[in-house]
Image (cartoon, helix red, strand yellow):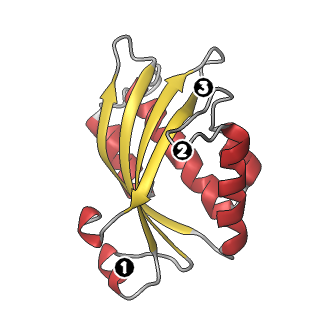
Amino acid sequence: MSGLLLAAVLWLVGCSGDGPLTPEQEIAAFLERFEEAAAARDVGAALELISEEYSDAAGRDKTALKGVVLQYFLRNEAIYARTSVRELELADPPDSAHVGVTAALAGAPIADVGELETLNADLFRFDLVLAREEDGKWRARSVRWRRAQLRELL
């Protein structure tokens, strides 16, 4: 999540100084850590955000997902991300959430969404199921992804 987007999310949910973070703020921080792990191509940091109970529709568990992440990181010398949170639905109580994110991943910095037409960027739609686990940290329990169209990022 870009710094500007993170600031907007925190402002929208009413960050209240020294008080505890809201679930929305915690999820925004989760997404920022995931983006930082991708930029650093840090498989360990990325996997720290994935639940041991991870499973997806393709039958992958956390170990299989590690292979997908590692392959993507190895194929790309540099990863710059531009993301947009499209939806955030919290369960009641707010210990799980569905988050829809569109993302552009490129080998060069993405200063503006308009540049995506000229960059060789991978565009994705991610649908994440997140859960706050026993240690209080949010982790992905399931992720669906598909290729996205440029219009989905605009």
Q: Dot 3: what SS?
A: loop
* Disc sitting over residue 80 in the figure: none
* Disc sitting over residue 137 in the figure: 3
Residue 141 vertical position relative to residue 152 in the rendered view, above or below: above
Q: Return the disc, 3 or 1, that comes first in the chain's sequence.
A: 1
**What is the CA distance from the residue labelled 2 to the residue labelled 3?**
25 Å
Residue type indicated by callout 3 = Lys
Image quadrant occupied by the N terminus: bottom left
Residue type indicated by callout 1 = Leu
- State whether residue 22 appears in this view: no
Q: Give me the residue at 62% from left, 63% from top.
A: 39
Q: Which residue is mark 2?
A: 58
Q: Dot 1: what SS?
A: helix
Residue type indicated by callout 2 = Ala
Q: Give me the residue at 35% from left, 64% from top.
A: 148
- State whether residue 126 appears in this view: yes
